[in-house]
Amino acid sequence: MAKNYFYITLLLAFFFTVSSSAQDSKQLPKTRDAVTIEGLSLYPNPVTNGKVYVSSKNDLEKDIIIFDVLGKKILQAHITTKELNVADLTPGVYIIKITEQNNSATRKLIVR
């Protein structure tokens, strides 16, 4: 009887070892290397005057897309200066995606 408990325990230990090692060997989802915009600054945030300023270390042309919290595209713009007019946006929380020379970054934008 003691031998049976020993073999059952040994079998369970083997089973749990195999199942835990199988979980460890699963590959994590591949994510592309996150390349962000160097020196990115978004101000003022929250926006109160209808204008937001987007600057970076290189201050190159930027493509801007603003989404609402449900993921719907609200505004798309191409800016060559630092100033972006958001006066048409209703007060709320938005996600702003900024792309500059194949690098992109996302930030939360609050409009009051």
Image (cartoon, rainbow, N blue to C red):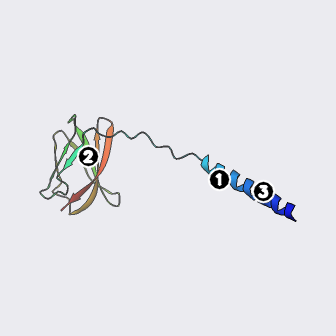
Q: Is residue 65 left or right of residue 1?
A: left
Q: Residue at x 32, y 40 (%)?
A: 36
Badge 2: how crowded within 10 Å, few (<14), some, or many (20+)? some
Mark 1: secondary structure: helix
Mark 3: secondary structure: helix
Relative height, residue 9 to residue 22 (above, below): below
The answer for how far apart the CA atoms under marks 2 and 1 are is 45 Å
Q: Residue furthest front?
A: 2
Going by the numbered disc 1, the residue's amino acid type is Ser
Badge 3: how crowded within 10 Å, few (<14), some, or many (20+)? few
Q: Which residue is mark 2?
A: 64
The answer for how far apart the CA atoms under marks 2 and 3 are is 59 Å
Mark closest to the chain's N terminus, 2 or 3? 3
Residue 79 in the image, given as x and y percentages of width and height: 19, 42
Q: Is residue 100 left or right of residue 9?
A: left
Mark closest to the chain's N terminus, 3 or 1? 3
Mark closest to the chain's N terminus, 2 or 1? 1
Q: Residue at x 31, y 45 (%)?
A: 105
Query: Viewer-proximal residue, 77 or 40?
Result: 40
Q: Which residue is mark 3?
A: 11
Going by the numbered disc 3, the residue's amino acid type is Leu
Q: Is residue 85 left or right of residue 5?
A: left
